[in-house]
Image (tube, helix red, strand yellow):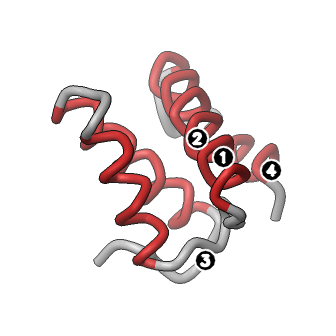
Amino acid sequence: MTVEEIFARFDGAYAKSTIRSYQGNFARFSRWCEEAGADPLNVSPAELARFIDYLAERCAAATVLHHIAGIGTIYRLSERPPVLD
């Protein structure tokens, strides 16, 4: 399933502003993954932890939590094994 297909599953289930926010957050995560040599739709817990550390150095705690929530939702909707428990 592609990222576009995953976000299509959001339609009607989430407010448009939430979808836009998750898309922006996932784009940031994807760019970080590209630089780190990781697949954003198949990260390991260690890779996700490194991304969270990266965000924590640059963002407020609420922003970090919002990114984590969005990534978790994307993984659930893509029917991939959860990275977060």
Q: Are marks 4 and 3 in contact (CB under 8 Å)?
A: no
Comparing labels 2 and 3, the label whose residue is closer to the camera: 2
Q: Neighbour class for label 1 at 10 Å: few (<14), some, many (≥20)?
A: some
Q: Point out the tag, 2 or 4, that comes first from the N-terminus.
A: 4
- Measured as percent of width and height from the top left, residue 85 is found at 28, 78
> Tag 4, which secondary structure?
helix
> Tag 2, which secondary structure?
helix
Residue tagged by mark 3? Answer: 80
Residue tagged by mark 1? Answer: 30
Comparing labels 2 and 4, the label whose residue is closer to the camera: 2
> Residue pushed farthest top?
17
Residue tagged by mark 2? Answer: 26
> Separation of disc 2 and disc 4 at Cα?
14 Å
Residue tagged by mark 4? Answer: 5
Q: Neighbour class for label 3 at 10 Å: few (<14), some, many (≥20)?
A: few
Q: Amino acid at mark 1?
A: Ser
Q: Amino acid at mark 4?
A: Glu
Q: Neighbour class for label 4 at 10 Å: few (<14), some, many (≥20)?
A: few
Q: Is 40 left or right of 61, judged from the image as shown?
A: right
Residue shown at the point (38%, 46%) measured from the top left: 54
